[in-house]
Amino acid sequence: MSPGQASGAEAWLRASGLARVDALALLRELAGIGHAMLLAHPDAPLAPATLRRLQRAAARLRDGEPLAYVLGWREFHGLRLRVAPAVLVPRPETELLVDFALAHLPPRDGARVLDLGTGSGAVAIAIAAERANARVHGVDASADALRIARGNARRLLSRARAGGAPRWHLGDWMQALPESARDFDLIVSNPPYVAARDPHLAALRHEPRLALVGARAADDGLGEIRELVAQAAPRLRPGGWLALEHGYDQARAVRALLRRAGLTGVHTLRDLAGIGRVSAGRAPSR
C-alpha cells in the first residue's frame, strides 16, 4: 500500500518510507494525531486533503529536507522558532552558546549584547527572553534572515521588555553597525565554519550555503571566524566576553585567534558529547 492509498493513520505511517520519529511528527503536526492517540486508535481515518499534505511533506523529507523546514518551526532553548530555508536550522549544541551568555552577561540594566550572524534570531531571542533588562542587537548579511528574526522576536518576546525590542542590523559583521556602537558587554556568534570542500555540505544542500561556509570560504572553515574576531574584539567593553561556536576540530585554532586579538581567559566549553563547541575570551580590564 502506498502512502497515497493509505486511509488510516498507522497504515500511512508504515507506508510513508520515513523514520518512525519523523512520520510521527508529521502525523502530529499535519493531522493532529499524537502518539497516544495513534496507540489507542491506529485506524484513525485520514481525510483526503490531510493525506495529500502528509504525502507532500513525506516526499520533502525523503529528499533530505530538514524536518524543521517541512514543519516550519524548531524548538530552541524552550522557544518555538519559525524557520525557513533562508536560515540555518538551530542545533541543540548552539544552546551551549546561550547558556554561556546567560552566565556571563552582567545583571545590570542596559547590558549590551550582540549576536553576529543571527539567522532566525535563535541566540539573540533566547538571551532576550531570559534577560529582560539587556539591550540586544542582532546582525546578519541576509535580509531574508533578518525578516524571520524580527518575526520571531515579535511573537516570542514581551513588548514590555525593559531593554526594549532587539535591534536588527543588515551587513557584514561589525560593519553593519556604526563605529560608535562599541562597549558591548557580550558578543556571541554561531558563524559559518564549514570548510569549503567539506564532504558533508552535500547533505546540507537545503540550508543556506552563506550561513555554512560564508563569503570568505576557506579550506579550514575559519575564513569568517578570522574576520569576525578581528572586527569584534576591539568593540568589547573592558572585561566583556566574545564567545563563538565552531566545528568539532577547530577549538585549538579558534583559541589561538582569540589570544592573538588580545583577549584573556581564553577557554573552550564542551557539549554533552564531550566535544569542544564554544570558545570564549575576555577583553582585558582597564
Image: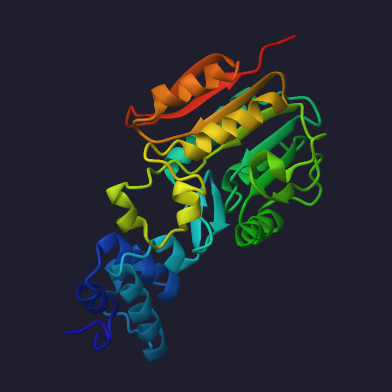
x then y, percent, for residue 73: 50, 61
x then y, percent, for residue 48: 37, 90
**Quarter of image, res 80:** bottom right
Above or below — where is 126 with respect to 260? below
**Quarter of image, res 59:** bottom left
x then y, percent, for residue 221: 41, 39
Query: In this image, 281 relative to 23: left or right?
Result: right
Residue drawn at the location 47% of the way across and 58% of the way down: 208
x then y, percent, for residue 216: 50, 44
Residue drawn at the location 45% of the way across and 64% of the way down: 69
Q: Quadrant of the C terminus?
A: top right
Residue drawn at the location 42% of the way across and 24% of the way down: 253
Residue drawn at the location 40% of the way across and 22% of the way down: 252
Q: Quadrant of the N terminus?
A: bottom left
Q: Nearer the viewer, residue 107 or 62?
A: 62
Query: In this image, 152 relative to 237: left or right?
Result: left
Query: In this image, 8 relative to 125: left or right?
Result: left
